[in-house]
Amino acid sequence: MPNLPLTPEFITTFLVFATCLGVVGLLAWLEKRPRATLQPRLLPTTPVMLVVGFVGILALVHLVNLAGVHTGR
């Protein structure tokens, strides 16, 4: 499929994947910063990072499937 990057499905899935990648990177950076106080943060970064990372993996698999590679059974 030579015009794959021009399809709306590819663009949407790629934007979801890129957003998930950015959010996971931001949350990893927030988690590794040194803490000034011992007060807990308002956003639990680890569970949010796991959920967003899972969505990112699903988006990556969808991109691979759009490219023509058969994943799964």
Image (cartoon, helix red, strand yellow):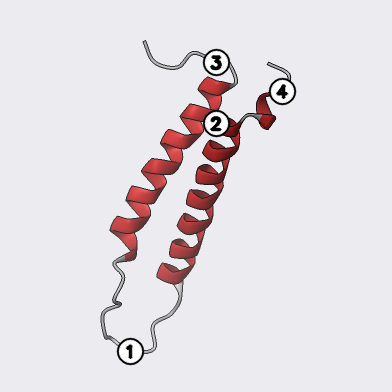
Where's the N terminus, which quadrant? Answer: top right
In the picture of the structure, the residue carrying the numbered disc 4 is 3
**Which image quadrant is residue 28 in?**
bottom left
Q: Secondary structure at mark 2?
A: helix
In the picture of the structure, the residue carrying the numbered disc 3 is 69
Mark 1 residue type: Thr
Are the residues flagged by discs 2 and 4 in contact, CB closer than 8 Å? Answer: no
Instruction: Answer few, some or many: residues within 10 Å of disc 2's Cα (few below 14, many 20 plus, some between 14 and 19).
Output: some
Q: Residue at x 39, y 50 (%)?
A: 52
Where's the C terminus, which quadrant? Answer: top left
Q: Secondary structure at mark 4?
A: loop
Q: Secondary structure at mark 3?
A: loop
- Which mark identifies residue 9? 2
Mark 2 residue type: Glu
Farthest residue to the right: give it. Answer: 2
**Which image quadrant is residue 11 in?**
top right
Q: Position of residue 50 (x, y in %)?
A: 34, 50
Q: Residue at x 55, y 22 (%)?
A: 66
Alpha-carbon distance for marks 1 and 2? 45 Å
Discs 3/1, front? 3
Are the residues flagged by discs 4 and 3 in contact, CB closer than 8 Å? Answer: no
Closer to the chain start, of discs 4 and 3, is 4
Closer to the chain start, of discs 1 and 4, is 4
Q: Position of residue 62 (x, y in %)?
A: 48, 28
In the picture of the structure, the residue carrying the numbered disc 1 is 37
Q: Residue at x 52, y 51 (%)?
A: 19
Instruction: Answer few, some or many: residues within 10 Å of disc 3's Cα (few below 14, many 20 plus, some between 14 and 19).
Output: few
Q: Residue at x 37, y 42 (%)?
A: 54
